[in-house]
Image (spheres, rainbow, N blue to C red):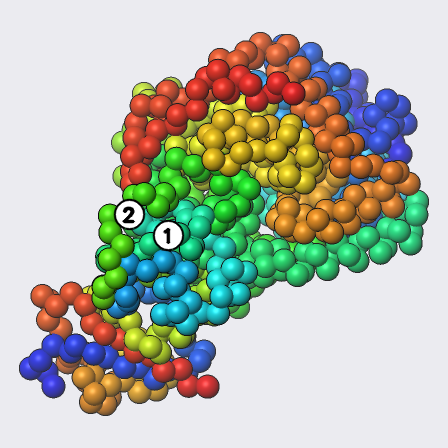
Amino acid sequence: MDKILRINVSAEGGPTALEEGLGEYAGLGGRGMTSGIISKEVPPLCHPLGKDNKLVIAPGMLSGSAAAVSGRISVGCKSPLTGGIKEANSGGQGAQALARLGYAAIVLEGKPADDTLYKVFINKDGVTIEPDNSLKMLGNYATVEKIKAACGDKVCCISIGQAGEMKLSAATVAFTDMEQRPTRHAGRGGVGAVMGSKGIKVIVLDDTGMGMRKPKNPDAFKSANKEFVAGLKQHPVTGEGLPAFGTNVLTNVLNEAGGYPTKNFSTGQFKESTKIAGEALAQIEKDRGGSATQGCHRGCVIQCSGTYNDKDGNFLTKQPEYETVWAHGGNCCIYDLDTIAMLDRLDDDFGLDTIEMGATIAVAMDAGIAEFGDGEAAINLIKEVGKGTPLGRILGNGAKVAGQVLGVERVPVVKGQAMPAYDPRAVQGIGVTYATTTMGADHTAGYAVTANILGVGGSVDALKPEGQIDLSRNLQIATAAIDATGMCLFIAFAILDQPKTFQALLDIINGFHGLSLTADDVTELGKSILSKERDFNARAGFTNKDDRLPEYFKNEKLAPHGVTFAVKDEELDQVFNW
Amino acid sequence: MSEQSPSTISFIIDKNSISIFSIILQQGFKVFAKVGSSLESMLCDQFALPPEYLSNRIQTIFLDGKPVDDVTSTMITDGATLALSAAMPGLVGATFRSGGALSVFRSSITHREEEEKSNISAQGMITLKLFNLLVSEIGPAFLERGIWVETEIIKNLIEEKKTEGKTVFKSLKVDGREIGPDEFSRLNWNEGQKLIEVTVQIEK
Ligand code: SF4
């Protein structure tokens, strides 16, 4: 992983590829790399779909190695949805393949002269770029089928669907999984629209003939990896709960807590939640010959994903995640898993963020475009997006735009990005993170180890509400660092509970790169990523007024607990004071 | 048989069919219990859960929809709803864990002991919900001991499964009398009767 591939789409006669060394970006990976390049090279005031924005695709520091769960990939740009910096994270085979091909990043830059669509093919011999207008307005599934017919079933695809081509702000970048299906997505912030604006439909990675990346200190790496895997396996969350039920295991718990946003965030409990919870989902998957335990990439030992078959036992989609089941389910009062799975499939095919689309449809339902609970109407609305009808284009630009066009006040967004599946009135600490993260409302920012392990910012007094500020800060720092490694954030629980497993993670990084990082260094890495992102957003015009939740969270009480979001603005302003 | 509404139903089912009760265990069922005791005492002394199971496995507990941090000082009163779960993934999972370092994140909805109105020891009825890993681990013991469920729910369950007959229900006794699949639809359900006692034996 010692080179960066730059594809300049402005070049006369079509895109050109240039390989260069890492230079000042040496040692960076994942979010560290994407935010490093974007903050340095992209003018913060540029138009997200214009010539000056760049799309950076970067595997993590450990991707392509034998390190377990290290195959996550980051996609970064200036976001068309938020107008700020963006890192969207995905599973799939892309991280491993790209890293094994030796690339620490692919950077798409410039602006194409016309609307010709291109496909990029990368293998051990180099890079080929060809025009291919036969791919125009194909969904991700059909695109991958065409690539499979031409290049075989071993290659990995990074592609956009119709939403990316139409440059909609909810468009994703899709990555194929182990079964070569485009089910894994860098979902948030409209990264697919930026890929579409560069005229690149698909990047095909063929890592045939490329071995695994080799650690600098093989013995230390190997034993640390063994310890790390054992730690993940022995922990009840990563060893049992996630493999058995996936992330959707959270539905019952959030609902019981009254923090499950229902009917466009108008109440905190959904009467029908057990019908769509992870327990029911896993049962259906097993009954129909699918699977409730599967990895999103080779090398994942947690395996929180699965396969969802239709009533006839045919593949419909991968196991919808908690956020998807919530967004298209409870938030729209839909409780039929087949409908939710179909919506997930359509989102994956058109290349749309499931969280943004579920939140947007709920806003549209609030506006009376469809009835809450009407699954068929929800499916038709997503199909409108895929077709690019005027209503579809409004919805495909996310909840904020839809709310403005349709005259809805209750629009759950921060910095233009829709909130995920946790109501910030019931879980106020998450509200602090939603409000202040550089990414717009994002649940994964802050999804990591606690202060107690990383020891950043002092320890937290759990009895004082102010503790939420400290904790959110520490979590955001830790998350930024983990996002740089390429590790899946679901390792968090095991490293949170088991200091030995956390040490094993450090030892893996050190053994692989020949370093001697300590927990403090990891903290510094996280801080430096956040500082770059905050600086970019400030230069893009963001102020502390953007670090706020929509007003109604302070005024509208959430049932059943009757709570409002009570963290004060001045407190929110302290999150990045380190 | 058809004159009287059933008040108890006992099922004998194959172990592979236990999942048909999974939704009931998650939605909530009622059990009699001595109330006015601590949560820990109720779970371990009355429901016979091993203390180490409570401390290691049941890591997320809700009392009347509020996360509980301390099982020893939290008292259970008549009519309470108790939901039990294993540890949950991710930040929010960690946030809801009993006594976890992230509990500050949901401090505004956390259960506080002073909210309890009474701790007088007496017989009462509580609602219990079991989630995720606990459904199959401790659900069967509650089913065997006997639970009270809304009559409507059991009526619907029998209705839904009647075509599968003996493959699901090895035996079904209504008020102590064995009935066959042909009698399922002739049961006379009393609309006014809210709860029915259900016991489930699992054939090993
Ligand atoms: S735990 Fe889940 S999301 Fe994480 S790498 Fe494994 S399958 Fe992918």
Q: Residues within 10 Å of mark 1 (few under 14, many from 20)?
A: many
Residue at 30% x, 27% y is A556
Q: Chain of mark 2?
A: B
Q: Is residue A96 visible?
A: no
Quadrant into which the N terminus of chain A falls: top right
Label for residue B74?
1
**Labels 1 and 2 in the same subunit:** yes
Q: Nearer the viewer, residue B41 or A65?
A: B41
Q: Residues within 10 Å of mark 2 (few under 14, many from 20)?
A: few
Label for residue B181?
none
Q: Nearer the viewer, residue A563 or A166?
A: A563
Residue ID for mark 2? B116
For the image shown, how many numbered marks are present on the structure? 2
The answer to whether residue A158 is above or below residue A395 is: below
Residue at 31% x, 38% y is A561
The answer to whether residue B48 is above or below residue A216 is: below
The answer to whether residue A160 is above or below residue B18 is: above
Q: CA distance from mark 1 to mark 2?
A: 8 Å
**Does the numbered disc 2 mark a residue whose Cβ is under 8 Å from ligand 1?**
no
Give how far across and how far down residue B129 sits, in percent: 36, 60
Give how far across and how far down residue A571 sits, in percent: 49, 19
- Mark closer to the chain start, 1 or 2: 1
Cβ–Cβ under 8 Å for marks 1 and 2: yes
Question: Residue flagged by tag 1: what amino acid is it?
Answer: Thr
- Residue A280 left/right relative to A153: left
Residue at 27% x, 81% y is B10
- Residue B13 left/right relative to A149: left
